[in-house]
Image (cartoon, helix red, strand yellow):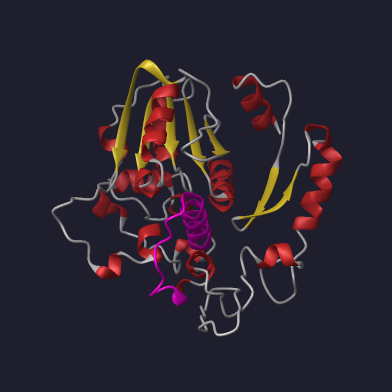
Amino acid sequence: SEELEDLAIELGLKDVPSYQIYKRGSVVGTSSSPSSVTVDAIRDQLKSASVTAASGCCPPGSSAAAGCCPPPSSGAATASSSSSCCPPSSNTAGAAVACCPDGSSTANAPSDPSEVLRLVQQSYANTVNQSGGEGGCCVSVDPAALGYTQEQIINAGKDANLGLGCGNPISFSNIQKGETVLDLGSGAGVDCFLAADLVGPEGRVIGVDMTPDMIFRARQNAFKRNSTNVQFRLGEIEHLPVADNTVSCVISNCVINLSPDKPQVFREIHRILKPDGRIAVSDVVIRPEKIIPDELKTAEALAC
């Protein structure tokens, strides 16, 4: 696509070294070597990934069973969700939260960084796939309560605002016309579209999110808005797909707290910011002197 070509040029790549195809937060296709990265190979894998089982959201085959719909295991508690495709879940806490949130009330928070990322990714994929962003494990919040004005709520559009933030970084980011703005964990695009209005046609806004479903929703919203100065890229905030010294302002809304390697996130922010760049972050922090209630220590609560 033109967007992929622009990214390759910005990063100084002569070709695309590899690719992965995601479906509902799980990898369903990948390149085996640089020589296998061809249009035909990608097309064939996309066709294969588009095949769905008659009984639900998961494609046939054992590899998919480990992703969206984990196979049932003997002795596992039955979990169900009116909005989910899942059979009774396995005893994997991450899978239970991501696909069948109703079965995760007593799940323990994972400690492995890769499992944390997978849990967060699948939890948000489950959220965005609900009708209107409702019914997922992450509870939507009235945007007005987070500091957005009525005008901003209208301008961003209902489909772009899933109510998953904890503030309004746009309100104190001092974004100027012509700037390049990067949103860490851009979701369905609410803050990106508000920033796009501020930077104008001569500026640029880049949204990075690690959940393919969120990127798909955000790109749909950009198309409906006819936004020409907004771009959404799939990537992790610990390893940003953005060139060095190219961003004027980094914004983020309740996302950095989800990272298992927060120092790496700030190293990446420092790398991509221009010398006079700045950050505007709305987030939550742990206060050591405060005791976190048990109900907020579950895997589901920590992911959301």
Does residue 137 show up?
yes
Judge whether 234 appears above or below 182 on screen.
Answer: below
Picture coordinates of residue 236, whole percent (x, y): 51, 40
Q: What is the residue that sits farthest to the right in this orientation?
A: 40
Name the main secondary structure of what is drawn in magenta.
helix
Picture coordinates of residue 253, whole percent (x, y): 35, 44
* Residue found 40% across the figure and 58% down from its top: 303
Judge whether 42 appears above or below 110 on screen.
Answer: above
Does residue 304 show up?
no
Picture coordinates of residue 258, whole percent (x, y): 39, 49
* Residue found 66% across the figure and 31% down from its top: 4
Q: What is the residue that sits farthest to the top in this orientation?
A: 275
**140 or 194: which is nearer to us?**
140
Residue range of the region highlighted in magenta in the rendering:
102-128
Picture coordinates of residue 27, whole percent (x, y): 66, 53
Q: Quadrant of the N terminus?
A: top right
Residue 111 highlighted magenta (yes or no)? yes
Q: Quadrant of the C terminus?
A: bottom left
**73 or 300: which is nearer to us?**
73
Q: Is residue 138 left or right of residue 88?
A: left
Judge whether 66 appears above or below 173 on screen.
Answer: below
Residue 236 highlighted magenta (yes or no)? no
* Residue found 62% across the figure and 70% down from its top: 69
Q: Is residue 162 left or right of residue 286?
A: right
Q: Quadrant of residue 235?
A: top right
Q: How many marks?
A: 0
